[in-house]
Image: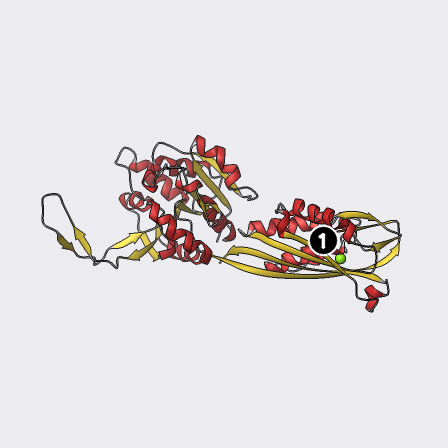
Amino acid sequence: MTFSAVIVAAGSGTRAGPGQAKQWRSLGGKPVLRWSVESFLAAGAAEIVVVTTEEGALVLQGALAGLRGWKFARGGATRALSVQAGLAALSDRPSDEPVLVHDAARPFLMRKTIDNLLSALVGKDGAIPALPVADTLKCVAPGAAMTTTSREHLWRAQTPQVFGRATLASAYEAWSGQAEPTDDAQVVEAAGGCVNIAPGDPLLMKLTYPEDFAMAERLAGSARITRIGQGFDAHRWGPGGSVWLCGVEIAHNETLVGHSDADAGLHALTDALLGAIGEGDIGDHFPPTDPQWKGAASDKFLIHAADLVRAKGGAIINVDVTLICERPKIKPHRAAMRNRLAEILSLPLDRVSVKATTTEQMGFTGRGEGLAAQAVVAVETPA
Ligand code: MG
């Protein structure tokens, strides 16, 4: 089902303590806001609008660097106005398309929550993730004795909350002038809408107080998984004066023969990245029968695979390439190759390795018939 998302990140979050607003703080090595954007991208959101302040807009590009499929909208003085600004900023999308409205302060958004919400919306005006109240509730009013309140029928509402886009927009119009609602479902309820409940997720905790960050930091590790990918490629030697390996051209008395520039190092690495995210192989994405890839520089293939990783909300942890040949000597070019790979992948140099070995003159690489390359990568993606 197609859906779009509005993420509200305009608050100053004073309860979370001094310093940067909580949506920009680092959690598990990246800004709090980025967690939600990556989750929506991984779930296939058609469009994501991030609503923030003018000052927020200045750090937004950096916080979401490398991610596509989102845009900025300027927030209003209240959350309600910010949500409406986000709805207005959505492109000309179908009026009944589901829109998920989310608070940036809830970073651990799992795919199953999004799926559950979209299912719960069917035939209703809205759906929210909610958890039953497990603790005993006490009422402590000034000057009165403590009393115990029944928790029966009580739920804790989380975000994202999903509605038909037009339903939510018109409910907000009808709400205009009333006190600030504490969530979007309240506005739809007031307009007579029927809002359904979907299973909430304890991981969807809202970062409110300073101590929440300590717990979230511990959870951050468990909300992501590490995937390993492996790639192999080989090309035959033929007549020529230079060879491309790991994005670097090396003078040599032969060249590798192939449809593209035959850079076996980049091909193996591209396949490893595709393998890590289950996206087939290089031939699926760039068919050798397609004339547009004839003689192509292979960094295009690697950039494409890295973009696919990022589109899934993933990040490359490290890459390790092994070139297998008797000649040319790789060592004098290793630093240049590492630098080039780090540049293509936007990775620090210590996360990029290029190694070389011979096969002691055995096999096709040993006899000088061809060159082979192996690559292993680690990629981190939403669980
Ligand atoms: Mg190849």
* Residue furthest bottom as drawn: 362
Q: Can residue 208 be seen in this view?
A: no
The amino acid beneath tag 1 is Leu
Q: In the image, 81: left or right of 363?
A: left
Q: Mark 1 points at which residue?
A: 266
**Vertical arrangement, residue 221 with respect to residue 364, above or below:** above
* Residue furthest front as drawn: 332
Q: In the image, 110: left or right of 80?
A: right
Q: In the image, 214: left or right of 343?
A: left
Tally of numbered discs: 1
Q: Residue 321 in the image: state x and y as whole percent.
A: 69, 57
Q: Can residue 341 be seen in this view?
A: yes
Secondary structure under badge 1? helix
Ligand 1 within 8 Å of disc 1? The answer is: no
- Residue nearer the viewer, 94 or 323: 323
- The residue positioned 47% from the left and 33% from the top of the image is 57
- Residue nearer the viewer, 112 or 297: 297
Q: Could you say which quadrant of the image residue 131 lies in?
A: bottom left
